[in-house]
Amino acid sequence: MILQIVILAMIAAFLGLRLYSVLGRRAEEEEHVPTRLEEAKRVRSDVPPADRTIVQARPQPVRAPELEGVMPAVETGVRNIAAADRNFDITGFLEGAKGAYAMVLEAFWKGDKPTLRELCDDDVYDSFASAIDARDRAGEVMDNRLVRIEEAKIDSAELDGRMARIAVRFVADIAAVTRDKEGTVIAGSMDDAIETRDVWTFMRNVDAAAPDWILDETDEG
């Protein structure tokens, strides 16, 4: 009987020591107050990688080469258009403007009114159509050729409500020849290309589903 009591007492003492050791460690861990450095490390490590860039210096916006050297107002206008139309791309726009420049000139020289109707607004189309009609009445034919476009640079840009307008200054070499009804050259020469400077303004509603820009105005540059 005495032996059993001794054995039970030893077991109770052993369990008591084990319980104390476990509770003692937990109490010490609960009483530990993290230092500011430890807390900062914990918070910093919890920030997702994508959010950490917010804490760091913000990257500077990339400047398009096409905007180098332009007036601040022009750059502001381009950025306003890009903000209103997320699909707007300045490089793609200029390439399209050069293509439109060539197409409109070719259509005008050939008297192709349907193509001009698609590419121009009413005022510009009427001006081209009147010139074509006058040329037809005189029996004259334009035998012009666009040799090359030397430069296409944005001259102005604005967002008026939801209507975007961008003026492009073109510098191009054009060989111009005018022939009479018999085919005789009455003006110009195909051997000498003339440098031509034009400022054409293109417009587009930024809410329109179609990505097409329309020729809104033509001026000599």
Image (spheres, rainbow, N blue to C red):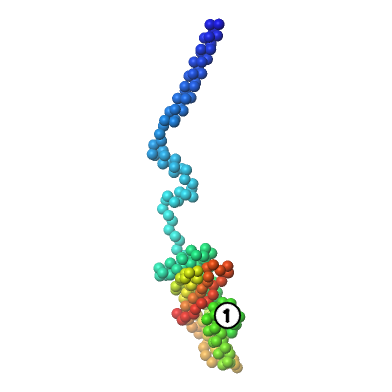
Q: Residue furthest front?
A: 161
Judge whether residue 102 can be spotted in this image: no
Answer above or below: position of 90 versus 129: above
Q: What x and y, as percent, mark residue 139?
A: 58, 92
- How far across and down, in percent of the image, does residue 53 sit? 45, 51
Where is residue 146 shown, x and y percent of the image?
Answer: 54, 80
Who's the residue at 46% across and 43% down the image?
45
Where, quadrant-wise, is the N terminus in this rendering? top right
Identify the residue position indicated by label 1 in the image.
116
Question: Is residue 131 positioned above or below 21 on the image?
Answer: below
Residue shown at 47% from the left, 43% from the top: 46
Question: 150 or 192: nearer the eye?
Answer: 150
Seen in the image, is 117 located left or right of residue 21?
Answer: right
- Comparing 10 with 62, the one in front is 10
Q: Secondary structure at mark 1?
A: helix
165 in relation to 46, above or below: below
Image height check: is 42 above or below 2?
A: below
Q: Amino acid at mark 1?
A: Leu
Image position, residue 157 (x, y; %): 46, 71
Q: Quadrant of the C terminus?
A: bottom left
Q: Can residue 13 be seen in this snapshot? A: yes
Figure label count: 1
How packed mark 1 is, by other alpha carbons closer than 10 Å (few <14, some 14-19, many 20 or more), is many
Foreground pick, 6 / 112: 6
Residue under the image location 46 percent in, 66 percent down: 80
Q: Which residue, as the protein is rendered here, is positioned at the far top?
A: 1
**Residue at 47% over, 23% down:** 21
